[in-house]
Image (cartoon, rainbow, N blue to C red):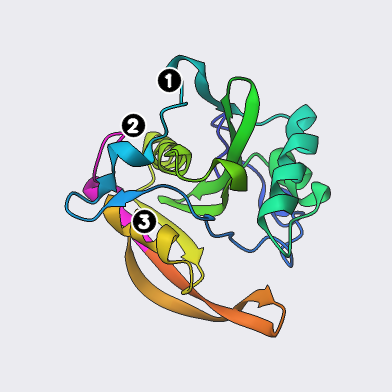
Amino acid sequence: MTLSCSARWLACDDARQVKAVDLRARELIVVSAIDPKRGRASRSGMGADIDETCLRVRPMTEPDLGAVLAVEELAYSFPWSKGIFRDCLRVGYCCWVMEHRDLLEGYGIMSVGAGESHILNLCIRPASHGHGFGRRLLMHLLETASAHRADTTLLEVRPSNAHAISLYQSVGFTQVGVRRGYYPNDEGREDALLLAIELANLKGPTHA
């Protein structure tokens, strides 16, 4: 069973209502500048135009779906439909949006249950890459998973997405498998790397 962000347990029948054929975990599109010496976002990658007092992460609601879908379609060649996002809200997945100066910059969707969490979609507006939004949102999801008593978090990423892989590794993710033919692409299908982290081994503060 799956634990929602409002701490409600869902019936298995409800969880199966989500359109599983489309609900494949999404990789984080290019996220932030990583300092290879420290494994953390460098100060130069934060973006001088980021006002921390105007940055917030809050639960996603149905009125957000238009803005969420607009970012999804900018970021992905094979985007989720509005119905998929609506289903994620309905079954109680942990759905969050990140806003900066009232502009929706990104969003994350994660399932949590039975001691394990799975990041299904983590995306940052393409024009806002390089400011550290992705790291902040990733850390928020991991801390949320820990608060829901998850021990492990899983996610998938394309092998070609070196920026996202570097970010994941910098906070403690390691590769635990490969999912063959997982992602659609213009040539057919592409494999996914399956990454995992034991949350006790999480590295770095939320605003690294």
Q: Return the residue nearer the eye: 143 or 137.
A: 137
Judge whether 184 appears above or below 44 on screen: below
Frontmost of labels 3 and 1 is 1
Question: Residue 39: image x %, image y %?
Answer: 23, 51
For residue 198, which quarter of the picture? bottom left
Q: Is residue 118 above or below residue 138?
A: below
SS class of the residue under badge 1?
helix
Please provide the residue range marked out in magenta: 196-208
Q: Which residue lies furthest to the left in this view?
A: 37
The answer to whether residue 165 is above or below residue 100 is below
The residue at which mark 3 appears reads as 168
In terms of depth relative to the viewer, which is nearer, 6 or 127?
127
Residue drawn at 73 percent across, 64 percent down: 78
Which of disc 1 and disc 3 is earlier in sequence? 1
**Residue holding disc 1:** 52
The percent coordinates of residue 7 (x first, y second) are 54, 31
Q: Is residue 82 rendered to the left or right of residue 75?
A: right
Q: Nearer the viewer, residue 170 or 10?
A: 170
Q: Which amino acid does label 3 sit on?
A: Tyr
Image quadrant in which the C terminus is located: top left
